[in-house]
């Protein structure tokens, strides 16, 4: 297949998985990497998730639930024609995947790996592929509510008139795994109803006198 055909940005309607095979391959590679990072890492969230909730991220239950969301998003990217995210955690997972895919494309353009084989594929125009990833993300993301979570002055629990007018929903971490609309895209049953818990502070042992 001609490389220009792969980078031809075929217009996809909102709510569709990426049609460009290189976009899909880059996103799946990034998702696989992030799944391993979250599973095995201790400081995995610092470059990706809102700092305000950093105490939650390394708890085993949160890591397990977020890994499921990464897998769900990857599955939708790979196999779905209808692309709808079910909850705030999936929106954050997609944001992570897109950021990591662009980093891989821009920083490691000579060797990007197909997650289903050991065969490397060549990226002739990293900038064009990165733009294609951005274009697809802009089409499928319904809103930019989650970006407010990175603003330290924003209160995700504020349900005042401004928040209601802007349609903010499920931005507090307690609601990240609550489905937006189960009839459209229900959350994975393994994390349905999961409420992240802040880890208990470690008690310091007093030294014997």
Image (spheres, rainbow, N blue to C red):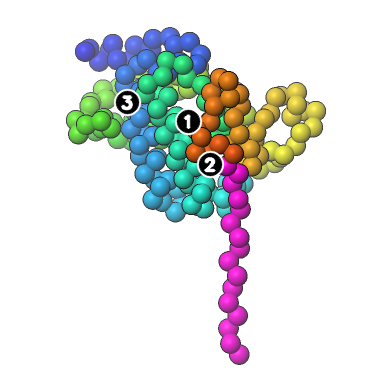
For this orientation, the residue located farthest to the right is 161
Q: Which residues are magenta?
A: 194-209
Q: Quadrant of residue 128?
A: top left
Residue 201 falls within the magenta-colored stretch: yes
> What residue is pinned by disc 2?
49
For this orientation, the residue located farthest to the front is 189
> What residue is pinned by disc 1?
94
Q: Residue at x 56, y 19 (%)?
A: 184
Q: Quadrant of residue 120?
A: top left
127 above or below 193? above
Sort mark 2 into few (<14), some (14-19) or many (20+) by Cα contacts within 10 Å. Answer: some
Mark with earlier residue (2, 1): 2
> What residue is pinned by disc 3?
25
Sort mark 1 into few (<14), some (14-19) or many (20+) by Cα contacts within 10 Å. Answer: many
Q: Where residue 62 sits: x, y (%)?
A: 52, 47
Q: Quadrant of the N terminus?
A: top left
């Amino acid at each position: 297949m001609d490389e220009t055909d792969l980078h031809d940005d075929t217009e996809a309607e909102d709510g569709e998985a990426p049609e460009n095979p290189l976009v899909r391959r880059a996103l799946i590679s990034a998702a696989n990497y992030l799944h391993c990072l979250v599973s095995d890492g201790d400081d995995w969230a610092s470059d990706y998730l809102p700092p305000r909730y950093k105490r939650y991220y390394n708890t085993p239950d949160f890591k397990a639930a977020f890994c499921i969301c990464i897998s769900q998003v990857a599955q939708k990217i790979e196999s779905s024609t209808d692309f709808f995210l079910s909850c705030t955690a999936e929106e954050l997972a997609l944001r992570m995947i897109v950021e990591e895919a662009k980093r891989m494309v821009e920083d490691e353009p000579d060797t990007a790996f197909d997650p289903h084989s050991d065969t490397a594929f060549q990226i002739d125009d990293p900038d064009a592929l990165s733009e294609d990833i951005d274009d697809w993300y802009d089409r499928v993301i319904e809103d930019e509510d989650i970006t407010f979570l990175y603003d330290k002055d924003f209160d995700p629990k504020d349900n005042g008139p401004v928040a209601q007018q802007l349609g903010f929903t499920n931005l507090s971490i307690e609601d990240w795994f609550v489905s937006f609309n189960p009839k459209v895209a229900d959350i994975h049953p393994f994390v349905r109803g999961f409420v992240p818990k802040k880890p208990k502070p470690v008690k310091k042992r007093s030294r014997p006198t």
